[in-house]
Amino acid sequence: MAHDQQKRSLKLESLDELVAEANRLLGSGYTSRGKWNLAQTCFHLAEWTRFPMDGFPRPPLLLRMIFGVMKATGMVAKMKAGILRNGFRPGTPTAPQTTVQAGALTDQAGVEQLTRVIDRMKHFTGVIQPSPLFGEMDRELWTRVTLLHAEHHLGFLEPS
């Protein structure tokens, strides 16, 4: 499992910077300091970026029950505040449908997928679907969460 000291410091100020960073890693090459390569990272980021447009996947019953308890006890609000203050933490479980096996797609295909979803996000005029963790989101919060998520995962990829 990756540790914070293996992550590089990465600050993304805009969705354009996110796409530029993915393309920079694609062009320069990189060393993965975490569990995923560039294709896996881009696939994961693209999936979580599109959910506010298309709807979030329904978690299994057990996870819905756990999340309900977490909401009722204020743990969800605390987790949300921590992410917005400090970013995402390594090792947090994710929805399995947001991951792909190494070799399932090329880095080029992953970057292209992420680029398409970010472009779609930038032009999206529909209703932003509520997040299981962040609840109702406006465009500003959706963008902030997307950038924090990208900083976390792309931070594990060290440019060559």
Image (spheres, rainbow, N blue to C red):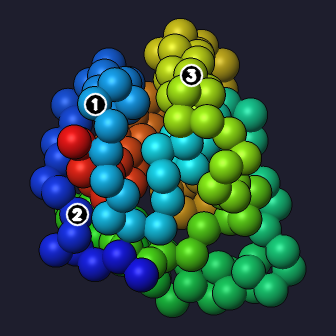
In the image, taking residue 13 as reference, residue 115 lies left or right, namely right
User: Is label 3 in a helix, a strand or a loop?
Assistant: helix
Disc 3: which residue: 112
**Side of 13 where 61 appears, left or right:** right
Q: Position of residue 18 (x, y in %)?
A: 33, 30
State whether residue 52 is above or below residue 135: above
Callout 3: 10 Å neighbours few (<14), some, many (20+)? some
**Residue denoted by label 2:** 7
At label 1, which amino acid type do we have? Ser
Q: Position of residue 66 (x, y in %)?
A: 68, 87
Q: Which residue is mark 1?
A: 28
Q: Identify the residue at image location x=51%, y=89%.
A: 73
The numbered dot on residue 116 is none
Give the mark, 2 or 3, whose residue is nearer the N terminus: 2
The extreme right residue here reads: 61
Residue appearing at x 42%, y 41% in the figure: 146
